[in-house]
Amino acid sequence: MADQKALYLQEKQRSLVIGGKDIPVPGPGDLLKYGVLVDSYPVILGGDIGGIVEEDLRTDLTAKQLDALTRFCVSITEAWFDNRHSGFQQYAIAIAEISAKVPDHVSLEEAVSVPLAFVTAAFGLYGTGGQGEVSRTRLIAPWQGGVGKYTDKAIVVLRGASSVGQYVIQLAKLSGLSSIIATASIHNEPLLKSLGATHVIDRRLPFEQLQTCVASLLPSKLEYVYDAISLPETQQIGYDLLSPGGYIMIVLDQSMDVDESSGKSIVRIFGTAHDIDQREDAKAVFSHLTQLLDSKAIKVGRYLFDRSSVVTHFMKPNRIEVLPNGLAGIAGGLKRLENDAVSGLKLIARPQDMYRPE
Ligand SMILES: NC(=O)c1ccc[n+]([C@@H]2O[C@H](COP(=O)([O-])OP(=O)(O)OC[C@H]3O[C@@H](n4cnc5c(N)ncnc54)[C@H](OP(=O)(O)O)[C@@H]3O)[C@@H](O)[C@H]2O)c1
């Protein structure tokens, strides 16, 4: 019997259709193996989840703790495309260790802009990639004692107004980097500066001009580039701008020409908390997310800081727009994204909202 509604992609590159679905039953063994390809249809998409926790199956907590911690609180989690853990449905399974409670002052719709984009930003800057204890960029995360630590360093963030880019800027600020240069549509300059960017450059400049313009703003050394576009051209620009020994973080497969003698490192990001190899990184992120989002937090993890620049900075969720018509409104939102008609915003759907024909 179908107990809830879900939005299905029935075949590759076909339209999205609302259909009935059983409510998935939580149980042990929810951990998934990492894999990026969808090979069976119909599939339910949706990379982020926020909602009310109805049932918590953690066995290591007392009933009292469970009640205090999770019952009826709202949580955000990163979804996965296996029809149990994916987002475009009314009920889904969340894995407790990669979920976070939403602070009271943040709406559920704002909070749900966070998980996938924030994890992608954080894994790029601070993640181990599952390759040992040390981050691939050698940066120490704010939640591991790295707040305000990198005042002598600069970063270029390509596609700064994207969901991922906005979190990269905020994290770079939290890490103390003194030059944070972002590319974006110029109308997003005030937004990005409010998040911590020191300079914003028009992303529509021809590539050569963009490169010259970024270069003119750089301090003597550029150790970090976060390329949230990762087109072949931007990867090459970012790589060429880097100083020897620097790190470029990319969100798509590597396509730039590499100079092996430069000592530059390429960090390919897989921003999924479901990846077992990166699970420790993910747990660290999610266990600090509530505090990072909480405007009253002057504490990151167990570290207490008294520097005013740090104390006043906390993570802001992306700006959001709630789509009309629940699950049925998602297709229209995707079309706007495809047409590059969404700027500096995250589109949110409320699966419980009823579809009302216009
Ligand atoms: N590797 C991973 O695990 C992973 C995870 C998540 C996302 N991603 C990838 O990361 C990228 C960013 O995702 P997102 O969700 O953060 O993006 P998003 O929020 O949808 O990005 C929207 C912004 O991108 C900018 N933009 C659009 N077209 C552009 C172009 N041709 N060149 C430069 N900027 C452009 C626009 O900036 P302006 O408004 O300033 O013009 C717009 O505000 C995507 O490619 C996504 O597939 C990868």
Image (cartoon, rainbow, N blue to C red):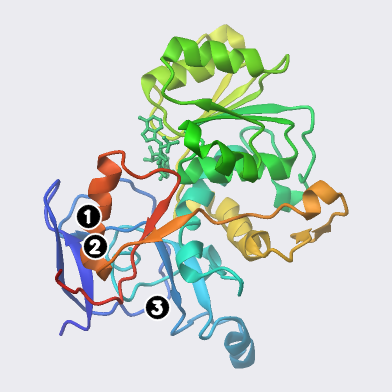
Q: Residue at x 85, y 54 (%)?
A: 305
- Name the quadrant where ligand 1 sits: top left
In the figure, is residue 60 to the left or right of 111?
Answer: right
Residue 69, image x, y percentages: 61, 81
> Badge 2: how crowded within 10 Å, few (<14), some, or many (20+)?
some
Q: CA distance from mark 3 to mark 1?
A: 34 Å
Residue 152 found in image quarter: top right
Q: Is residue 26 visible?
A: yes
Q: Secondary structure at mark 3?
A: loop
Q: Secondary structure at mark 2?
A: helix
Q: Amino acid at mark 2?
A: Gly
- Between circles 3 and 1, the one closer to the viewer is 1
**Looking at the picture, does residue 173 appear above or below residue 313?**
above
Quickly name the residue at label 3.
27
Q: Quadrant of the C terminus?
A: bottom left
Q: Quadrant of the N terminus?
A: bottom left
Q: Amino acid at mark 3?
A: Gly
Q: Residue at x 43, y 14 (%)?
A: 207
Residue 119, image x, y percentages: 52, 50
Q: CA distance from mark 2 to mark 1?
A: 6 Å
Q: Residue at x 58, y 7 (%)?
A: 261
Asked if disc 2 and disc 1 are in contact, CB closer than 8 Å, the reply is: yes
Quickly name the residue at label 2.
329
Q: Is residue 244 visible?
A: no
Hey, which residue is sitting farthest bottom in the picture?
64
> Badge 3: how crowded within 10 Å, few (<14), some, or many (20+)?
few
Q: Amino acid at mark 1?
A: Gly
| Total numbered labels placed on residues in the image | 3
Quickly name the residue at label 1.
332
**Looking at the picture, does residue 243 appear above or below residue 56?**
above
**Looking at the picture, does residue 346 appear above or below residue 226?**
below
